[in-house]
Amino acid sequence: ATLERDLRTGIDEERFSVVYQPIVALAGVAAALDPGTDPGAAPAVVPVMVEALVRWEHPDLGTVSPGDFIPVAEASGLIVPLGRWILAQTCRQAVRWHQLYGDAAPRMSVNVSARQLQEADFAAEVARLLAASGLAPHRLTVEITETATLHPSCVQSVHALRALGVRISLDDFGTGHSSLSTLQTCPVDEIKLDRAFTGTCTAPDGRTVAAAVIQMARALRLDAVAEGIETPAQAQRLRELGYPHGQGYHFAKPQPAEAIDALLAAGT
Ligand code: G
Ligand code: G
Ligand code: MN
Ligand code: NA
């Protein structure tokens, strides 16, 4: 209850910040992974997308991670106003990068809770934020979880978002109870391979699972992002299997917008 009260104050006083984790094209990191090049060299990070991750600057607790407060925000409904603030911030940031770097700017990927998608006017709200910021709809991806796809009202919002031209990504793919049936009931543009499967992809059985997922994604013409890549061996394996995109500490941690600017400036 205390956390909920603090969260309410935090929203009123805008005590949140957003950090951005690069998502890279795995084909592009081939050179850095080839034997013969300096194995110690850090891979060149060119973010084709970034995932927005919220942080809470609590007056007493310091920086609180979303794993600790998003569940409270969801249960209390405070995720609705907080999520609106996050979308407004991230749309504005995406436009800033597009103004500076044009089509080389990273597209923006934002996590959205089932609780937010359940709002009947969620897609209308996103349309309003896109118009207010001037962000092109295809530059925004909304990351949803399988839980959301179990609610008809959420699926309705997904249809409305796609009608706007916003991309939909299915997060944590493979960990739910019905990942495959989800793809039949809820249209998505992208899947994010859960980091549990990235963690096992260098073992024989894990390789088979990661391969099956990318084959299915290709057959359904879906984009795919492998998340939680922490080692060169995982990056190499997922690239070989044909994952177009990767994300994880091996490439870059979530970081403030200014740090992403430095990467983008170095890449131009
Ligand atoms: O950054 P971290 O690993 O602590 O994030 C934990 C969880 O919080 C992740 O599952 C992530 O999807 C979720 N999360 C992070 N930022 C947001 C956000 O802006 N909105 C929502 N709804 N969830 C978020
Ligand atoms: O549930 P979701 O996929 O939105 O969660 C994203 C979270 O995963 C972020 O909070 C981010 O900090 C975390 N994350 C990103 N890259 C890595 C990684 O390479 N390893 C691990 N363990 N976590 C990661
Ligand atoms: Mn996510
Ligand atoms: Na995930």
Image: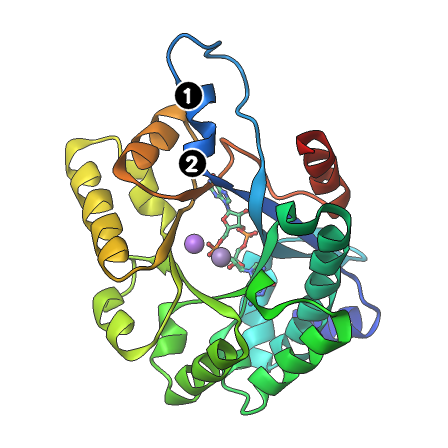
Q: Return the mark for residue 111.
A: none
Residue 13: image location, x then y, percent: 84, 69
Provide the residue designation for mark 1: 33
Q: Ligand 2 within 8 A of label 2's CB?
A: no
Q: Amino acid at mark 2?
A: Leu
Q: Quadrant of residue 153 in the image?
A: bottom left
Q: Quadrant of the N terminus?
A: bottom right
At a point 57% along the width and 32% down the height, the residue shown is 45
**Kind of residue at disc 1:** Leu
Q: Secondary structure at mark 2?
A: helix
Residue 48, how many percent across, how many down?
A: 55, 45
x then y, percent, for residue 245: 43, 44
Place of residue 6 in the rendered image (x, y in percent of width and height, measured from the top left): 74, 70
Q: Which residue occupies the foreground of this view, 40 or 99? A: 99
Does 194 appear above or below 237?
below
User: Reading the chain from its start, which is encountered first: label 2 or label 1?
Assistant: 2
Q: Quadrant of residue 35?
A: top left
